[in-house]
Amino acid sequence: MVAGGRIPRTILSNLLSRVTTGSLSSSTSSSSSSSSSFGPPSILISRRGIASKLYVAGLSFYTTEKALSDVFSQFGQVVEATVMMDKVSSRSKGFGFVTFASELEAEKAINEMDQKPLHGRVIHVELAKPRRPYSSAPIARGPPEPPTDVQ
């Protein structure tokens, strides 16, 4: 999230202009159409294609989202910084994502931070790849069913 939890001024002004011109569906429209919900700013930005998300590997288990955001903010406007956590142990998985407001800032961060130490560990920074869809193969749960004798 952006420092202070605010939406950047350029994004906010663009949204407001779209709402006033009617290019966004309003929540007062008919009940048959879906109401527009934007979600967090990072989702809106990435859907519009103006943000660049970086994958950061090799993070220390003690690196927080705020620390990650602070380190990468020297290269440009950080929209969101996320450290992936293990659900069971509530400990860092050792990687995270940083979303920048522009591709230029993201490229600068890659060039400056890749293979550099952060909190005692060498990190690897690259452009994040889109998620692969899950395969449609069935998931085996439990033992196989016994064969039925049909004659």
Image: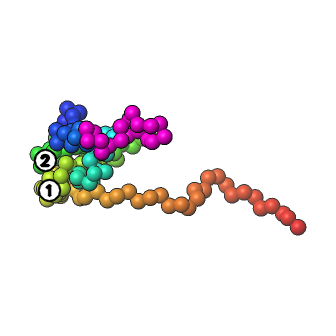
Q: Nearer the viewer, residue 118 or 19?
A: 19
Q: Quadrant of residue 127?
A: bottom left
Amino acid type at mark 1: Leu
Is residue 139 placed above or below 31 in the rendered structure?
A: below
Q: Position of residue 129 (x, y in %)?
A: 31, 59
N-term mark: 1 or 2: 2
Residue 118 shown in magenta: no
Which stretch appears magenta? 19-37
Q: Position of residue 40 (x, y in %)?
A: 31, 39
Q: Which residue is mark 2?
A: 76
Q: Is residue 123 left or right of residue 137?
A: left
How far is disc 1 from disc 2 in space, using C-alphas? Answer: 9 Å
Q: Is residue 121 visible?
A: no
Q: Main secondary structure of the magenta part?
A: loop
Residue name at image x 40 percent, y 37 percent: 29
Residue name at image x 20 percent, y 49 percent: 100
Q: Is residue 93 visible?
A: yes
Q: Is residue 142 left or right of residue 61?
A: right
Q: Badge 2: few (under 14), some or many (20 or more) residues near its Cα, within 10 Å?
A: some
Q: Is residue 36 left or right of residue 42?
A: right
* Dots 1, 2 in contact, CB < 8 A: yes
Q: Which residue is mark 1?
A: 104
Residue 27 shown in magenta: yes
Amino acid type at mark 2: Gly
Residue name at image x 85 percent, y 64 percent: 150
Is residue 90 placed above or below 98 in the rendered structure?
A: above
Q: Quadrant of residue 132?
A: bottom left
